[in-house]
Image: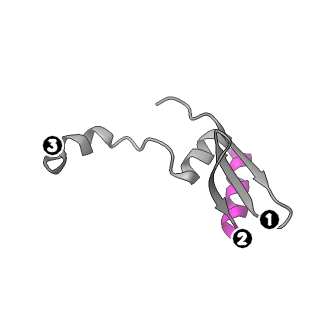
Amino acid sequence: MPRPQGFSYTEQPDGTVLIAHQSRPATTLRGPRATQFLAEVESGDPQLVMARWTGNYKRGNERTARNHPRNRH
């Protein structure tokens, strides 16, 4: 799986974290979720962490879903 790219985040003075993908807002985190996100970003690969938190990453089940009888055309 290729490494995600183009993610950035900004921590606001009130503790809110804004995550953007290619300069477009992707998600906003507040409170304990923002704190947890910041801890994960510091301990791991920031691009992978941001991709996971925004839900913008491949999960590995795309081929399985494509082959499911319900999704065949």
Q: Quadrant of residue 15?
A: bottom right
Is 35 displayed left or right of 70 in the figure?
Answer: right
Residue where numbered disc 1 is placed? 15
Q: Quadrant of residue 7?
A: top right
Colour pattern of the rendering: one colour
Which residue shows up at 67% across the image and 57% down it?
A: 37
Residue 16 sits above or below residue 63 on the image = below
Which residue shows up at 62% across the image and 47% down it?
A: 50
Crowding at dot 1, Cα within 10 Å, few <14 / some 14-19 / many 20+, comes out as some
User: Which kind of residue does numbered mark 3 sit on?
Assistant: Arg
Q: How many marks?
A: 3
The image shows residue 38 at horizontal and vertical percentages of 73, 55
The image shows residue 41 at horizontal and vertical percentages of 70, 48
Q: Secondary structure at mark 1?
A: loop
User: Which kind of residue does numbered mark 2 sit on?
Assistant: Gly
Closer-to-camera residue (43/71): 71
Q: Nearer the viewer, mark 1 or mark 3?
A: 3
Q: Secondary structure at mark 2?
A: helix
Is 39 displayed left or right of 59 in the figure?
Answer: right
Residue where numbered disc 2 is placed? 31
Q: Nearer the viewer, mark 2 or mark 3?
A: 3
Q: Furthest-bottom residue in view? A: 31
Residue where numbered disc 3 is placed? 72
Q: Secondary structure at mark 3?
A: loop
**Which stretch appears magenta?**
30-43
User: Which kind of residue does numbered mark 1 sit on?
Assistant: Gly
